[in-house]
Amino acid sequence: MHLWDKGGKTKESLISFTCANDRIYDARLAPYDIVGSMAHAVMLERCGLISAGEKDSLLAGLARLFEETAQSDFSIGKEFEDIHSWVENRLHAMAGEPAEKPQANFKGNQIALDAAGKLHTGRSRNDQVLTDLHLYIRHQSFLLAHDLKKLAEDFLDLSETHKGDLMPGFTHMQAAMVTSFGLWFASYAESLCDDLHVLSGAAALADASPLGTAAGYGTSLPIDREMTAELLGFSRLIVSSPYAQMSRGRTERQVTGAIASVAGTIGRFASDVILFMSPGYQFVALTEDLTTGSSIMPQKKNPDLFELIRVRCNRLLAVPGEIALMTAGLPPGYNRDYQELKAVLFDAFDGITELIHAIRGALEGLVVRKDILSDTRYNDIFSVEEANRMVREGVPFRVAYREAAKKAGSGSFSVASVADYTHTGSIVNTGRKIIQQRIDDLMKGFMAGCSPEELQAGIPVRARLYNS
């Protein structure tokens, strides 16, 4: 049964084409959809659109459905078009109808039939799925932020461990100046700070309630949009009803843009590792359990893990552009094209989460070489230190620069003391505490308590406060 069924006949092949894959993605939205319906039911009762008994019946039935969606084998059967029709039909079935449904004999909470039929009052699937997606994005962004925090702190720990392990820094792919693995690791922790900042801004776009905008043009029924926003923990409303549908694709593009930013950081680190493992560098190595071999070359220990991390990160870089192309030039209002954004969005969150876990595991097997600068090939990188030594003696820098340049290639430069590096962001002073504080501050921008389970538990509390 479809919520739009008027008694006619629709080709089964059309239903299969339009719904088959979407049911899979809707199953992931199920808990968010149900808590949204809980908030909606509470609001309907307060506005006098359903009775207190009908509200209680709906909340009891929805709680039972919430438990069903938590089961590992939960899926939406092909007899249902989407999560919204599944919920409404299951509520009817729990009351003993409709008889043609396989759930007809389920005698759960005996929800009144008219109460089940009133749940959709004052809303459309258009604002309903958008609410689901905003709840999903807000929650998943919170989880992603915590994963990023852990990864950034892994980099900071490695920065402290390897603060004194020197390496050459490069410009134009040429050895340039002395630096350290401590700074290398710290730079990626700081890059993740910027990624957290971008993610926080993108998540803020989803922290707005579209519920009650209906099909995109509001409703003549006396609903209270502010109340449902409060019950679901949204910080604000999408005010203009038409903008709710205009925002489809825009929010997803911004969020996947933030994911792409993270992918850019991780992918670049993976590329560094691959380069630094190569014969011309040999700055780092991987423990044997993190390498693969060759079917023909016995000596090979390949960094396949990092190569696949790199390419999967590069694929995520393309996702915002994919969304832009999918939604370009669409006419006003809801368009079924938006349905295809779910797969892209979910895959992006899944992909970046898997990559973070992979890179964190790989860091445990990354071995840093500690004697790199004993190689005479890198002696010239201390020419800057020679020039700085003369500057400290009062020689103008340009004169000192020319004098140091005369000795380039001679192998005669002295290895500088790292103790000379004292400013913030240098070898001795990597700025770890500053970066850690920035991470902690950025994490305050992500809303806690936004999981479906926490929202469900909080709705009665927020309702009492709202009514007071």
Image (cartoon, helix red, strand yellow):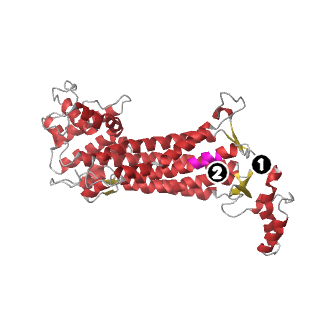
Does residue 110 appear in this view?
A: no
Residue pictured at 25% horizontal, 34% vertical: 15
Work out whether residue 161 or residue 82 is closer to the camera in this orientation and state it: 82
Residue range of the region highlighted in magenta in the rendering: 267-273
Mark earlier in primary sequence (2, 1): 2
Q: Check disc 1 and report its element: helix, strand or loop.
A: helix
Question: Does the magenta run of residues contain 418?
Answer: no
Residue pictured at 79% horizontal, 60% vertical: 382
State which quadrant residue 78 falls in.
top left
Asked whether, in this view, residue 325 is left or right of residue 172, the answer is left
Q: Residue 185 carries which label?
A: 2
* Callout 1 crowding tier (Cα within 10 Å): few <14, some 14–19, many ≥20: some
Work out whether residue 42 or residue 105 is closer to the camera in this orientation and state it: 105
Q: Which mark is residue 372?
A: 1
Asked whether, in this view, residue 130 is left or right of residue 192, the answer is left
Q: Give residue 345's position: percent from left, percent from top.
A: 40, 45
Residue pictured at 41% horizontal, 49% vertical: 322
Work out whether residue 76 or residue 454 is closer to the camera in this orientation and state it: 76
Quarter of the picture holding the N terminus: top left
Q: Give residue 156's position: percent from left, percent from top.
A: 62, 50
Q: Check disc 2 and report its element: helix, strand or loop.
A: helix
Q: Give residue 279's position: percent from left, percent from top.
A: 73, 43
Q: Which mark is residue 403?
A: none
For residue 100, above or below residue 315: above
Q: Which of marks 2 and 1 is in front?
A: 1
Residue pictured at 74% horizontal, 52% vertical: 167
Q: How many marks?
A: 2
Question: Does the magenta run of residues contain 272?
Answer: yes
- Main secondary structure type of the part rendered in magenta: helix
Does residue 455 appear in this view?
A: yes
